[in-house]
Every structure is written in C-alpha cells, then in structure tokens.
C-alpha cells in the first residue's frame, strides 16, 4: 500500500524495519502499547502526516457537537417527560410520547438530509455543509457566528434524534417514582404536585437517564459520525469515513482508540454522577 506493487526486496526489508515488523511479536506489541499511551500513533498512510496532528485539529469539533447535543437533548427530553408525567392519561401526555417515538424511529442520516433540504436548500437559512465558509471571516465575532451557522443543522439533527430516547427513558422512570411511598408522604405533608416532581421525583428519575446516556455513548458517537458525513463536518466522523475509503489503517486504529477512551470516560463520569444523585450508592 505504501510503496506500490513494484517494491524491491531491499525496499520491503527497509519498510519492515522502519515499522518494527522484523522484531518478535511480543516486542512489537509492547512497543505498540507504549506508543499509544504516549500519543505516538504513527503517520497516515494516505497523507503521510502524523495522525496526532490530524486528529487534534478535528476532535474538538466532534466534542462540541456531541456534548452540546447530549446536554440539550437530555434537558428537553427531561422537560417533556415531566410534562408527560404531570398530565398522565391526558392528550398532551400521549402526544409527547407519540412524537418522541416517531422522531426516535427516524434514521439520523435521513433526518439530517431532511433538515438540509428544508432549512438550507429551500429556506436558505443555514449553510448546506462544512465547518466554516470557504473564505471564513478573520475577525473573532464574525468567525464565531460563521462557525455557529455551520454547527446549527448537525446539532439540530442530533438533538432531535436524542430527544426521543430521553423522553422514553425518563418518562418510564418518572412513572415508577410516582408509585413510591415517599411521593405519597410528600403530598400528605402539603407539597404541591409541582414541588413533589421537581424536589423529589426529578432527582431519582435522572438516574436511569444518566445510565442510559453513558451506556449508549458509543451509539451517540456513531450517530455523530453519520451526521458529520452528511454535513461534511470536519470532525472525527469524516476522518474515519475518509480513512475507511483510503484504507488508512493507522488513522482508523487511532480513531477507534479515542472512541473507546470516550466510552470509558463517559461511564466513569456516570458512576460519579450516580453516586452524587443517590447517596445509597456511596455506602
């Protein structure tokens, strides 16, 4: 792949030596682990540049997209679940859960294409794709506004895709909490329904949502990868897509390493948040 089919035997031997392929397998493995833990991920087969340099210019775009969409989708989903919990059996409760199920069933890439068609092609409110304009502004404020304009549609796609899951998970948790004895005790003390929901039920209902978000962080990243491809967002997703097309294995290995690390960190943060919300876990 690197030198083509006409490599001579000395050239093949030189390449094997440069990659350490002439060493014993156990030595190759420990060198590989040491390099990955120190950020030495090699060079891209396609561009020849260090992979760390290529990813470092893209990873923050993915982090911004995933973190903002998760926070906003979780907040909106939590609010809709609370509204649905307060009006159980009423029309707006059924509408909230029905709309959540419909949106949740949409493929994320199809939802992105629909938003592009409506808001970029037909209405012209947002750019069709990219991270910045072809000639981005040099002043800070216009540059930030240009970045936000390109971020809007991919962010909206992930938010709409994530709201459905948040509503479904949190709504079920709220209904379970409303059946607990402490809710009846709180109402007997004279607390209103709103006070019971926000002071007591909400705190305990967050636990399943946090667990679900952490366990599904890998799927959230997978959705972000598809959205980045649809919108040509200059993040880790498009980098993985181009690496697959170009058979750039070192780039893929580094990308999957970062995704695995992100899933581990997400679950670790979920454990801390779980213990913070539920003191029984700390015992």
Image (tube, rainbow, N blue to C red):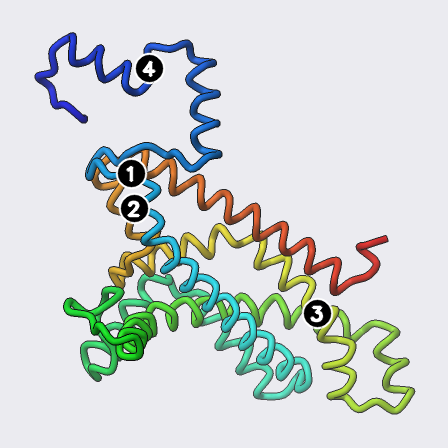
Residue 22 in percent (x, y) is at 33, 10
Mark 2, residue position: 54
- Secondary element under disc 1, as helix, strand or loop, is loop
Picture disc at residue 50: 1
- Contact flag, marks 4 and 2 (Cβ < 8 Å): no
The Cα atoms of the two marked residues, 4 and 2, are separated by 25 Å
Residue 187 in percent (x, y) is at 86, 86
Q: Nearer the viewer, mark 2 or mark 3?
A: 2
- Does residue 190 appear left or right of residue 142 in this picture? right
The Cα atoms of the two marked residues, 1 and 2, are separated by 7 Å
- Contact flag, marks 1 and 2 (Cβ < 8 Å): yes
- Secondary element under disc 3, as helix, strand or loop, is helix
Asked whether 160 or 42 is in front, the reply is 42
Residue 92 in percent (x, y) is at 57, 87
The earlier-in-sequence mark between 1 and 4 is 4
Instruction: Say if 142 sits above or below 257 in the image.
Output: below
- Secondary element under disc 2, as helix, strand or loop, is helix
Q: Label 2: how many residues lie within 10 Å, few (<14), some (14-19) or many (20+)?
A: some
Residue at 45% x, 20% y: name it: 29
- Contact flag, marks 2 and 3 (Cβ < 8 Å): no
Residue at 20% x, 82% y: name it: 124
């Amino acid at each position: 792949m690197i030198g083509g089919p006409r490599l001579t035997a000395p050239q093949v031997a030189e390449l094997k030596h440069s990659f350490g392929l002439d060493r014993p397998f156990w030595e190759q493995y420990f060198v590989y682990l040491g390099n990955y833990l120190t950020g030495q991920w090699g060079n891209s087969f396609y561009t020849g540049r260090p992979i760390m340099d290529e990813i470092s210019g893209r990873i923050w775009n993915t982090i911004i997209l995933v973190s903002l969409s998760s926070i906003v989708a979780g907040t909106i989903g939590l609010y809709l679940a609370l509204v649905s919990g307060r009006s159980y059996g009423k029309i707006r409760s059924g509408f909230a859960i029905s709309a959540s199920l419909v949106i949740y069933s949409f493929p994320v890439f199809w939802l992105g294409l629909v938003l592009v068609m409506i808001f970029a092609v037909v209405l012209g409110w947002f750019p069709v794709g990219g991270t910045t304009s072809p000639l981005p502004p040099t002043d800070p404020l216009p540059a930030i506004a240009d970045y936000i304009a390109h971020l809007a549609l991919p962010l909206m796609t992930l938010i709409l895709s994530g709201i459905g899951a948040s509503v479904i998970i949190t709504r079920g948790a709220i209904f379970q909490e409303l059946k607990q004895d402490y809710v009846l005790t709180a109402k007997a003390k004279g607390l209103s329904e709103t006070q019971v929901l926000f002071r007591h039920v909400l705190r305990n209902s967050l636990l399943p949502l946090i667990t679900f978000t952490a366990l599904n962080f890998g799927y959230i990243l997978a959705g972000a990868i598809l959205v980045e491809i649809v919108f040509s967002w200059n993040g880790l997703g498009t980098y993985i897509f181009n690496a697959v097309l170009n058979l750039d294995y070192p780039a893929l290995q580094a990308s999957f390493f970062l995704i695995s690390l992100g899933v581990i960190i997400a679950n670790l943060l979920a454990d801390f948040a779980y213990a913070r919300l539920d003191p029984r876990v700390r015992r």
